[in-house]
Image: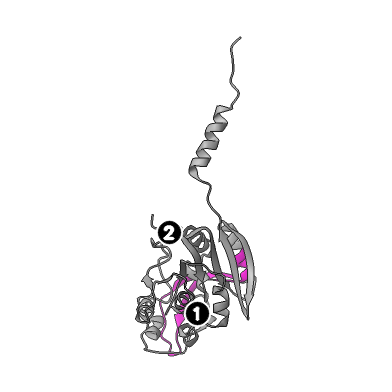
Amino acid sequence: MRAEIPAARFAAGGEDPYARMLDGGSDGVLRLRRVSSGAIAQEWDFVALSAPADGDDLAVLGGCDGPLLDVGCGPGRMVRAAAQRASAAMGIDVSAAAVRRARADGTPALERSIFDRLPLEGRWRTVLLMDGNVGIGGDPRRLLERCRDLLAPGGVLIAEGAADADLDEQSLFTVVDAAGAESAAFPWARAGWRVLMAAATAAGLADATHVRSGARHFVRAVAVAPRPISTALTATANAADHRPTRTSG
């Protein structure tokens, strides 16, 4: 069953600065701007997002098994890095320009939202949320619940959080580039690593731990195997069989 999809998506609409950068129309920095105040909340260096995975990225991938799903893959640097480590990997992104860019380099990528029906539902061994993608949809707990559903039992979620451990912001934002081109508004969230740990636990993931790599902060959590329906039904039947009965006499 298809999950409800947020009405607006990251950096889409308006002058679409993200697509402009991906298609080579501009370069530099993308800025996340609060609709309520116009203040800049975060910046992304487009060159870094397009460059090969760095040492911190590779350290995160060190303990990952395939198949691996990179959510919000952009140009696909993490997918390529995972594939080079002999892991089956795929990226998804709602941006058609991002998927074109990834595929141009031979990177497996689909133009999908994480809230769409995806291949290998419940069978991914690793799901990545890097570079602020914990903000997707504007509700980290709901996002992590969806990641949980995508993972195989024992599979691992790795989510990058802000260094400010207690940062917890959910609001409407736009994205603007250096030339002033601005997207339509979309729901987004910003979360520190401690907030992400709590969200992972609330989403039904287990063993949430904080991992630091250089100046970056990640949360690692594990999908727990659901209780088989047949087992639950058997337990209910057994309980019914052992209920006390009234006898006449």
Q: Nearer the viewer, mark 1 or mark 2?
A: 2
Q: How far across and how far down the image is residue 142, in percent?
A: 51, 61
Q: Residue furthest top?
A: 249
Asked if the stretch drawn in magenta spans residue 153, the answer is: no
Rendered residue at 48%/67% (across/down): 66
Q: How far across and how far down the image is residue 228, in percent?
A: 50, 45
- Residue 43: tell me if it is visible: yes
Q: Which mark is residue 32?
A: 1
Q: CA distance from mark 1 to mark 2?
A: 31 Å
Horizontal side of 8 relative to 241 (left or right) equals left
Give SS at disc 2.
loop
Q: Nearer the viewer, residue 80 or 84?
A: 84
Q: Name the residue beneath numbered marker 2.
A: 121
Q: Nearer the viewer, residue 65 or 51?
A: 65
Residue type marked 1: Leu
Q: Which mark is residue 58?
A: none
The span picked out in magenta is 168-197
